Amino acid sequence: MRERIKRREGTVVSAKMTKTVLVRVDRMVEHPLYGKRVRRSTRFMAHDERGECKEGDRVQIIESRPLSRNKHWRVSRILKKAAG
């Protein structure tokens, strides 16, 4: 049986590299002792073949084969363009 492809939704925080964007994915976790919900974020390097993404865009990324040392994700689609 084939594995499911991992998908994440996040915000582009840097688009300064060629064909690469840095995407911040936020998640809410409960503090182990106090029980309060805390926001945690992870940053993924994602491949943007057409170079369409700009900072502030909301994007969906999907897991792919390793494209470089740190890049294992591809931009699947832009969900919402940044204002401006």
Image (tube, grey):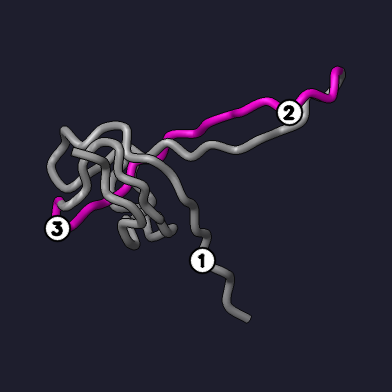
Residue at horizontal 14 percent and vertical 51 percent from the top: 51
Foreground: disc 1 or disc 3: 3
Quarter holding the C terminus is: top left
Which element carries disc 1, helix, strand or loop? loop
Residue at horizontal 33 percent and vertical 52 percent from the top: 80
52 lies above or below 11: below
Point out the residue furthest to the top here: 34
Residue nearer the viewer, 80 or 69: 80
**Image coords of residue 48 (percent x, y):** 22, 53
Which element carries disc 2, helix, strand or loop? strand
* Residue type, numbered disc 1: Ile
**Image coords of residue 40 (percent x, y):** 59, 29
User: Residue 62 lies in what quarter of the image?
Assistant: bottom left
> Which secondary structure is most common in the magenta stretch?
strand
Which element carries disc 3, helix, strand or loop? loop
Q: Earlier in the sequence, mark 1 or mark 3?
A: 1
Kindly identify which residue carries mark 1. 5
**Image coords of residue 44 (percent x, y):** 40, 40
Point out the residue furthest to the bottom here: 1
Disc assigned to residue 37: 2
* Residue type, numbered disc 2: Arg
